[in-house]
Image: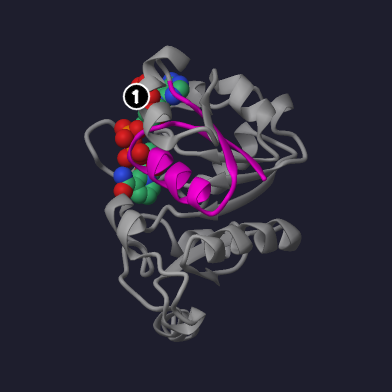
Amino acid sequence: MKIGVIGAGNIGHTIARLLIKAGHEVALSNSRGPESLKDIIDELGPQAHAETVDNAAAFGEIVLLAVPWRSPEALPHPDLVANKVVIDAMNPYGTGGSVIDLGESTSSEEVARRLPDTRLVKAFNTIWYKHLAELGDVSKPEAERRAIFIAGNDLNAKSIVSDLIRAIGFAPIDAGSLREGGRKLEPNAPLYGKELTATEAQETLTNL
Ligand SMILES: NC(=O)c1ccc[n+]([C@@H]2O[C@H](COP(=O)([O-])OP(=O)(O)OC[C@H]3O[C@@H](n4cnc5c(N)ncnc54)[C@H](OP(=O)(O)O)[C@@H]3O)[C@@H](O)[C@H]2O)c1
């Protein structure tokens, strides 16, 4: 598939590398423009190319958001992602590293307000990028793989993102809706940063 990656830092670059290994085509973007991504594109090879944020979003059948949550200006124009599966890997940290208090809301619900009409799936936000780079293993049975939690309201979109997660050697674990599931995946919430196999993750989720 064609994947547009918004943000080519720790998490965007790492996921792009894994998706390319799984056979996908990736357009990467950042704040400084396509020329600044030359070294990354050289490393990732011919299945990768650099774009502006809006062009990466337009390119993607699926679009990954991997920029600071606190910077809404980093997101593509909403029209370019309407009706697309959009993966929100972002966490609501302020500039000093503190978690932004969203009251009753959750960070992905706020993203859904910024980008209405997308088929939004929260995923990859609870795993450290180095673990993402190292712990995927397609040779393992799914129950023994490292879990990646997802949340969202669109079941078909969650199924598509789950297949991507399986293809890079992890196990998708559905925490529920964007609100109830998403809340469990926020920084400081019970599932954030947890090192769990799929079996352990499912048990933990059931016991919450
Ligand atoms: N690091 C992790 O292990 C991890 C794990 C899970 C989730 N996350 C979440 O993923 C997101 C990215 O984290 P990260 O660690 O990958 O950050 P990072 O290494 O600092 O990378 C951030 C990326 O966003 C781009 N960006 C920033 N402002 C932008 C703007 N206004 N327009 C376009 N692009 C912009 C940066 O581009 P420039 O370099 O050109 O400015 C850079 O490519 C955060 O929301 C974080 O909470 C991180």
Residue 140 at x, y = what percent? Answer: 44, 79
Q: Residue at x 35, y 76 (%)?
A: 196
Q: Residue at x 70, y 36 (%)?
A: 116
Front one among 152 and 64: 64
User: Residue 95: which quarter of the image?
Assistant: top left
Residue 66 at x, y = what percent? Answer: 45, 38
- Determine whether 190 is above or below 43 in the image: below
- Determine whether 90 is above or below 202 in the image: above
Residue carrying label 1:
39
Span shown in magenta = 1-30
Count neighbours of disc 1 (C-alpha within 10 A) and say few if under 14, some if 14 to 19, many if 20 or more. few
Q: Residue at x 47, y 83 (%)?
A: 143
Residue 96 at x, y = what percent? Answer: 22, 34
Residue 208 vs residue 86: left or right?
left
- Determine whether 91 is above or below 43 in the image: below
Determine the quadrant in which ligand 1 lies: top left
Q: Residue at x 68, y 64 (%)?
A: 159
Residue type at mark 1?
A: Asp
Residue 22 in the magenta stretch? The answer is yes
- Colour style of the rendered protein structure: one colour
